[in-house]
Image (tube, grey):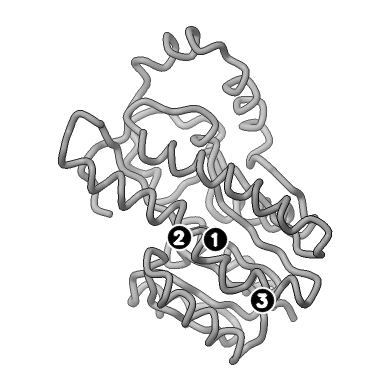
Amino acid sequence: MSRVFITGASSGLGEALARHYAAAGATLGLVARREAPMRDLAASLQGQHQVYVVDVAEPARLAEAAAHFCATVGLPDVVIANAGVSVGTLTEHAEDIDAFERVLRTNLLGMVATFQPFVELMRGRGQGRLVGIASVAGIRGLPGAGAYSASKAGTLAYLESLRVELHGSGVKVVTVAPGYIHTPMTAVNPYPMPFILPAAEAARRIARVVERGERYAVVPWQMAWVARVLGILPRWLFDRLFAHAGRKPRGLPL
């Protein structure tokens, strides 16, 4: 029976991943900030699971949760750093500085804090999966999403660094860059979202990527082509095409 540690598990993709792995017989460590949804989720899953009401922006508390899971259940086979927040941001608004800090602390530093307690233990065992949920939004800087794009670009670079550091150790670092997924995070987006996936289907596809131990995958595959095109667009053309693109609302709760 596998052991899976998931952050951001109270809703959206994290919840869908939890349901997928629990249905497959895994024992889970469920991490999120909101207690009531976490308790409800754990109660609805088959099997016995550990619940940790922890913000990934608090590394010490996250390390305590990791230590408790290892002592109680055992070293995870898979750690999924999924916790993330998103909000529209504009640099000219001083009040958005706090939003920039929160998004970067959660999406990027929270991923580092999620993996840190497990890296040496997995290296010592000679196996494991460290799975980072990045985003296609990290490939190019999107207007009105400076904080989110910056955080996800950071995760892409960080995960590549970590993968190289662990090369040959038996520990696989898996970078997943999703496109659009039906979650509360995307429900507020006032613009078209091509190739959007239901959360349960996205979780199924991501779990398949994790099982194969792929280094990097875009989900769904159609967004992989979008990502490739975005990556090669010359800057002048990218600027012209995206200058008036739809923008996520500012001031959303984080």
Mark 2 element type: helix
Query: Left or right: where does residue 56 sit relative to residue 20?
Result: left
Q: Position of residue 210 (x, y in %)?
A: 72, 57
Considering depth in this image, is 158 or 199 the residue closer to the camera? 158
Q: Which mark is residue 76?
A: 3
Q: Which mark is residue 81?
A: 1
Q: Earlier in the sequence, mark 2 or mark 1?
A: 1
Query: Left or right: where does residue 216 sit relative to residue 34?
Result: right
Mark 3 element type: loop
Query: Left or right: where does residue 162 sit relative to residue 45?
Result: right
Q: Position of residue 151 (x, y in %)?
A: 44, 44
Q: Which residue is mark 2?
A: 110
Q: CA distance from mark 3 to mark 2?
A: 18 Å
Q: CA distance from mark 2 to mark 1?
A: 8 Å
Please state which amino acid type lies under the numbered disc 3. Answer: Pro
Q: CA distance from mark 3 to mark 1?
A: 13 Å
Name the residue at 26% across, 36% down. Answer: 249
Q: Is 137 located above or below residue 25 in the figure? A: above
Query: Left or right: where does residue 168 sit relative to residue 41?
Result: right
Q: Earlier in the sequence, mark 3 or mark 1?
A: 3
Name the residue at 26% across, 46% down. Answer: 99
Q: Are marks 3 and 1 in contact (CB under 8 Å)?
A: no
Q: Are marks 2 and 1 in contact (CB under 8 Å)?
A: yes
Quarter holding the C terminus?
A: bottom left
Considering depth in this image, is 8 or 172 the residue closer to the camera? 172
Q: Which mark is residue 125?
A: none
Please state which amino acid type lies under the numbered disc 1. Answer: Ala
Name the residue at 59% across, 54% down. Answer: 132
Quarter holding the N terminus?
A: bottom right
